[in-house]
Image (spheres, rainbow, N blue to C red):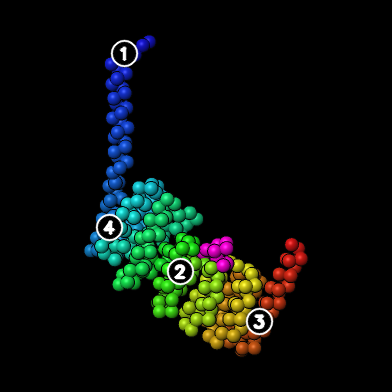
Amino acid sequence: MRIPRLWVGLAGAAGLLLVSHVASGAEQSDPAVEAKIQIIENLSQPDHQRIATRTSLLNDLRVNPGPVAARILKLGKEATNDNVRMQVAILLVDQRRGNKPLFPAALNPEITRLLTTWLETEGNDAGLRYWAAIGLAQEQNLQVLELLKAKALGPDVSPIVRAAVARALAAWRGDLLVKHVVPILLDMLRDKDIEMRVAACDALLRTELNEEFVIEPLLAVARTDPKEPVWRAAATALYKIGGGRLQVKSNATDAERKGDIQKWEDVWRSKRRREEREK
């Protein structure tokens, strides 16, 4: 049976209208996402409401990553208030916390530029710069490491920021971790600030590098650091990286502490020699 030309023409026109409608709809922002953006922008909203909204936007990213990510970046670029910018910076950090980032990889250069501007700009809110530094440290990007050394790891920077950035850098892997991050963390083991030495031990633990160039400096700290929180952090890093048992009782003397550490080292080195022979 032959379909009349009139009906073919009408059907074609309807199809074109449908495609046009879908295309125009794709360009429009999701009203639900826009409502959440407005909550983030509204400083009069309770903090718990804005935090819940951030979490909800992360769920939207999982469902529709491209448009939602673009809208979040647009908010960050257009915001004039540091608190709103900080909410975006936290989103940029949180979207990387899983096994796979929620933002499309094509947007990474734009993310880097935005976070770099927020960290570099003197006078920006301390909270904004804190989250921007962590976001940059998550990138495993050698190009931003010098900026982080200057703006987030220097001796004049808050220990809270330095510790958080050190822990974020410890998640790097491969040659970037070994050649560029580990030397920074080892240098922090000699910091005059107790908190920084503890953070360095914790960061080295997070590298998961069961290698002599990590184990030996931690052994030295565990044996010689005069502050118990520091040497205990080093001891914890040792047995979690290298295995075995290393428990120093709470009221241990200096000699007992060193004895327990030596026993652990003897077992670790014996195990390493066996592994090398097997290789």
* Residue 9, horizontal then vertical, whole percent: 29, 20
Q: Residue at x 34, y 58 (%)?
A: 54
| 173 to the left or right of 1 | right
Q: Could you tell me which secondary element the residue under label 3 belongs to?
A: helix
Q: Residue at x 31, y 13 (%)?
A: 4
**To which residue does mark 2 refer?**
146
Mark closer to the chain start, 4 or 3? 4
Over which residues does the magenta segment extend? 171-179
Residue 93 occupies quadrant: bottom left
| 23 to the left or right of 249 | left
Q: Could you tell me which secondary element the residue under label 1 belongs to?
A: loop
**Kind of residue sitting beneath label 3:** Asp
Mark 2 vs mark 4, CA separation in Å? 27 Å
Whether residue 47 is situated above or below residue 105 in the rendered picture? below
Mark 4 vs mark 3, CA separation in Å? 57 Å
Nearer to us: label 3 or label 2: 2
| Badge 4 density bin: few <14, some 14–19, many ≥20, Cα 10 Å | few
**Kind of residue sitting beneath label 2:** Glu
Mark closer to the chain start, 2 or 4? 4
| Residue that protrudes farthest toward the top in the picture | 1
Q: Which mark is residue 260?
A: 3
Residue 207 in view in this figure: no
